[in-house]
Amino acid sequence: MKRIITTAALLSLIFTNAQQVKKDSANSKEIQGVTMTKKVFQKKADRMVFDVAASPIAKGTTGFDLLKETPMVSSTDNSTLKILGKNASVIYINGRKSNMDPEAVIEMLKNMPSENISKIEVITMPSSEFQVEGNQGIINIILKKKPTDGTNGNIRFEDNQGYYNNPSGSVTLNYRKDKLGISGSVNGGKYTQQQYYILSNGNKDFKQTSEGTVTGPRTYLGGYINIDYQINDNQNIGFSYNHRNRWGNDFRSNLYNETTKYNNGNPIVERTRTVNLTEDNNNNDSFNLNYELKTDDKGSKLSLSSSYLHFSKTEDNNSTTHLLDSNKNEVAVGLNFLQKTPLVIDNLGFQADYVQKLKNNYTLSFGGSYNTTKTDSDTYYENLVPPTGKDPNQSNHFIYKEKITGIYVTLEKSFGEKLSTKIGTRFENTNADGNVVDKNIGIERNNNNFLPYLSLNYNPNQNHNISYSFSSRVSRPAFWALNPAKVYLTATNYVQNNPFTKPEINYNNELMYMYKNSYFVTASYNYTSNASEQIPLHGVNQNGDNVLAYIRSNYGDRQEFGLTFGLQKQFFKEIWSANHTLTLGHNIYKGSVDSDPTDTQNLVTFEKNIIDKSADYYQFQLVNNIRLSAKKDWFFGANYFYLSPLQIEIGELKPIHGAEISLKKMMDNWTFNLQLRDVFGTNRNRIYGEDGSGNYNSVNQNPYNRQLVFTATYNFGNQKLQKVRKAEGANDDIKNRTGGN
């Protein structure tokens, strides 16, 4: 049901250019009687480092909220994280990728106490050894470490009052004794999002509008356990298990639809109401076994990992379309169907990495990975009004098998303290086949990709830094997006996934200059071939009804230019922490889509959507934290973002802006935080687009984003306890493609 709101799926991928929230300083700090001098924000080799360990404003919040205040990281929807407003982010913990699907990772971060975090590293251009998709960047969270045995933990409670009241909470425990470390956490809660939609499309001959509410309740329960054992000074072995369950029993949309057709200039109006009721349940279980061997005292090491992932989803949608009279009274049932869209994903992965420290400041890294994945999507569609029974045209059983083999090598050289460089390449072979049982729909692929990487980092002195990076990546479609099933919003408005969607190939360039670790300028250029998106197509079905279908397709090429100016600095003896950015951008989209490749029976005749668009845009973000007391126990935060009109594949995204304020109080082991999000209720999304054939589509999405959030955190036990080592999973790149749906 979550994907029947086509625009929500689109917007979550597209318009997160909107907000970037951060903070920084590089001054002397006095905390608990100890004076330290730290560069809180600085450029190191291939990453930006945000040192938050000594900052009292990092206390009493969550890992997710802390990331929203990290330089170069942003979130506008409170459910995804972006780097430089564009690139999707992958979360690593202590240099190891988190062993969960993307949605579960966000929930983990929202329940992670910020007190556990020492540093945050932002890698905008990951090198060849990283398993990441396309334009994804990396956010590496480094936890605090102290060689102390004992037990500690924290209890956290949050109450989010929006349109509905949404409570959540978590308990985390850490234990260390000699060579054994164990950590575990349990978290749970519920969240119901309320949205109001106005969707319209048409041309000179007809107009169709859908308007109404969408209510999405979700309840979740999850947790993890990590075990790390130090065999000796040179060897470690670890095991981790993550579980997450999310369910929703009353996901509901209620839309009033009005279609106007013109006959010799005379309007003929048809009125209907579509009600969708959905029950869904997601389960995610992942296991990881890892081993690490230090081969010398210079930092050389061997890492081995094996992982298993099982993901399952059930989703049952009962959709009813009522015929209405001119007074909007129900007179009959026009359409009533039951659609079941289950999905099962099983993945087994292996990974090996070796780092060798050489003479003359050379570092050689090489390794490989292997992943085998099977997905099973048995979509069932049943008409509940005559002619009743299973509809074979709408039902399909899609089985997809994929094997990915990757090897890489990188060479890094440091020329003293001023200059460092890294060069590498990654080779990936993708062997895949998928077919719809008993239908003439299938794919076979055997693709090879060489993906080079280069970075240069130059520090002429302590005040200046210049860096350049180039990377190339493959971005594969999410598994759910390959299942050729329709997901309906109304009887004539739906999303069509596409097993023929090819992987995108991304080429990324970035040039950065930083002054005194407080000011930076970044210029970027990204080119994508085989660019894909859910492209709106207008057509007419066999009944003569006008249809709007969002069909996932490779439409052509995409180019993105960006110039970002940033400031991260503290003023007035650290009373005011300012983090401000301004981005100027230019996007180009070229291509076309003219058909539904899964429609083998020509059930709908579509008109071509010609995509030939380019436009300038700008955005700015203002993030401010003010210390209200000399004891550093009261803080006030005020953030604001603005995004100008932005051209995207399906049309123009209208301006977006929003504000957030917060008040924080720290008291012994307690921290209390009060936030008001979307103060003015302006964080909403509007899109208008034309396809070059006289057709238009419009989206007005009004989520209830104004929320009053109260958080209370209590820390207990030995807070100097060393955290359990996290290990990278061999199937980490696969988890990001489950979609958490």
Image: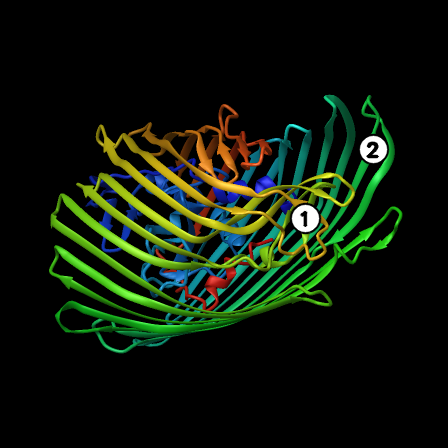
Furthest residue toward front: 264
Task: Name which of mark 2 and mark 1 comes first in the sequence.
Answer: 2
Q: Amino acid at mark 2?
A: Leu
Q: Residues within 10 Å of mark 2 (few under 14, many from 20)?
A: some
Q: Residue at x 18, y 73 (%)?
A: 358
Q: Is residue 4 left or right of residue 71?
A: right
Q: Amino acid at mark 1?
A: Val
Image label count: 2
Q: Residue at x 21, y 50 (%)?
A: 467
Q: Is residue 193 above or below residue 429?
A: above
Q: Quadrant of residue 470?
A: bottom left
Q: Which residue is mark 1?
A: 487
Q: Position of residue 511 (x, y in %)?
A: 24, 47
Q: Nearer the viewer, residue 706 or 656?
A: 656
Q: Nearer the viewer, residue 26 or 115?
A: 26
Q: Nearer the viewer, residue 589 or 631?
A: 589
The color scheme shown is rainbow
Say the numbered circle drawn on residue 323: 2
Q: Is residue 15 left or right of residue 424?
A: right
Q: Is residue 315 visible?
A: yes
